[in-house]
Image (cartoon, grey):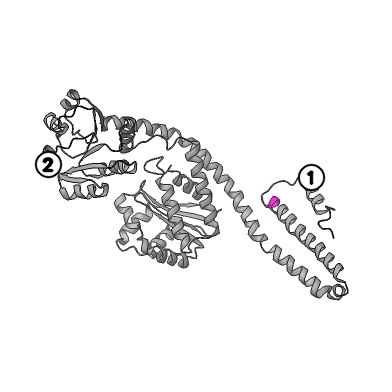
Amino acid sequence: MKHLKIIAFTHKDIELQELGKLILPEQDIEEKLGGIKKRFNISEIFYVGTCNRVEFIFVLPHHTDSNFVNELIHELKFANLCPHSRNSLVSKSVVYEGDVALEHLLRTSCSLESLVVGEKEILAQIRNAYERCKNVGLTGDYLRLVMNRVVKTAKEVYTQTDIAKNPISVVSLAYRQLRQLKAFENSRILLIGAGETNQNFAQYLQKYQFSNFFVFNRTLEKAQKLANSLKGKAYPLSELKNFKQGFDILITCTSATKPIITQELYEHLLNGETTKKIIVDLAVPTDTHKKVIENFKLDFIQVQDLEKEADINKQKRKLEVNKADDIIQQNVDEFSSILKQRRIEIAMEQVPQTVKIIRKNALEVVFAHEVNGLNNHEKKLLNKVLDYVEKKYISIPMIMAKDILLNEAVSQHSISRNYETINDTTCPFTD
């Protein structure tokens, strides 16, 4: 277990802009990692690079310190990384080894080390990073076992705790409230503003089959880009006052310092309709004038209320961290036994072939003269006996070796059971 190493650069200690200097272009990953694998005699390696972290997970027998980290980063030859920046990043890196490395990787995959606890994206990012490196031969059997444990642990944490069950992003909470209002997929949707928040909200809407979009933005080009992704129509914000097609849902998030959805504009947008509407206002300050909320029949979702709910849900997620840590620790403890068992399996892989060689030598060299003197029936019987002995000889030592290596006390009962198995007199064949 001590051979597992992780070098981590994360958002906890490094500004995201600086962290970005360590991101490897995807087309360079095989060459770069292959180079350091050979240079430092690393047997297996993969690399995770996201907006919040860069981590190198590898297998190496000797101790890893800051000098090693410095050499490794220097060897990767990042184009935009000067010696001063490299030294600064190295000083802020964290090196994990052995059980602590596995615990860190499990905590990371379960989002306990993420900027937002409970967000599941990191598990997929780690799995994809591993698969990419596995496919080009950078990983082997050891990291295969590690990743099996990563996936197993994450599934247990996400199913046995509530760490990911309470939404904490404003956009996801807004969408959930919208769905609770039973909005229909064919609703006419006005998107006012084409920034990141509305882009993210639109992705939710599109994912759940909403399809009737009208996008307004100060910059028409940006509105057009979002509208194209939604198969909707784009307009400059100045055309909002002339829009006469009606709406069912109005979603707004602009950088305006004063409300842009005035009573006069809202009444125009209604175009004579009297049905109840939905406004989702994700702007700070709000884009909707208070008279609109007071004087018209509508459901109003605003960012201030969503942020309060998000804070409550964050606290709920934090309460689940201890449960997740217990699951992680159990998996760390179990993994040591998994590794020991795997070492036995690898060591024992040569046993069947060796036994076959001994058998062949006995029949064809040591006792060749005696065997040649047997008739066909006797030769057939001898081979059946040897088949039986060979099978027993291979299986029993492997079982007992695993018991010994795993430090499991071999009770008198198990010894007797194995002895009875070896001395089983039931004939495995009949003529």
Q: Which residue is mark 1?
A: 412
Coordinates of residue 32 in the picture (x, y in percent): 40, 65
Q: Which residue is mark 2?
A: 239
User: Is 402 a magenta residue?
Assistant: yes
Magenta span? 401-413
Circle on res. 274: none
Q: Amino acid at mark 2?
A: Glu
Give the side of residue 160 with respect to residue 213, left or right.
Answer: right
The residue closer to the viewer here, 322 or 186, is 186
The residue closer to the viewer here, 126 or 100, is 126
Give the side of residue 19 with respect to residue 283, left or right.
Answer: right
Coordinates of residue 38 in the picture (x, y in percent): 47, 67
- Residue 179, by quadrant, is top left
Coordinates of residue 274 in the picture (x, y in percent): 19, 27
Coordinates of residue 352 in the picture (x, y in percent): 71, 63
Q: At 52% from the left edge and 56% from the top edge, which residue is drawn?
A: 143
Q: Is residue 347 above or below residue 329?
A: below
Q: Are marks 1 and 2 in contact (CB under 8 Å)?
A: no
Q: Residues within 10 Å of mark 1 (few under 14, many from 20)?
A: few
Q: CA distance from mark 1 to mark 2?
A: 88 Å
**Circle 2 — which element?**
helix
Q: Is residue 121 above or below residue 302?
A: below
Q: At 24% from the left edge and 50% from the top edge, which residue is drawn?
A: 228
Q: Amino acid at mark 1?
A: Gln
Q: Quadrant of the C terminus?
A: bottom right
Q: Residues within 10 Å of mark 2 (few under 14, many from 20)?
A: few
In this view, which residue lies farthest toward the top? 294
Residue 228 visible to an observer of this rendering: yes
Q: Is residue 58 above or below residue 180?
A: below
The residue closer to the viewer here, 327 or 214, is 214
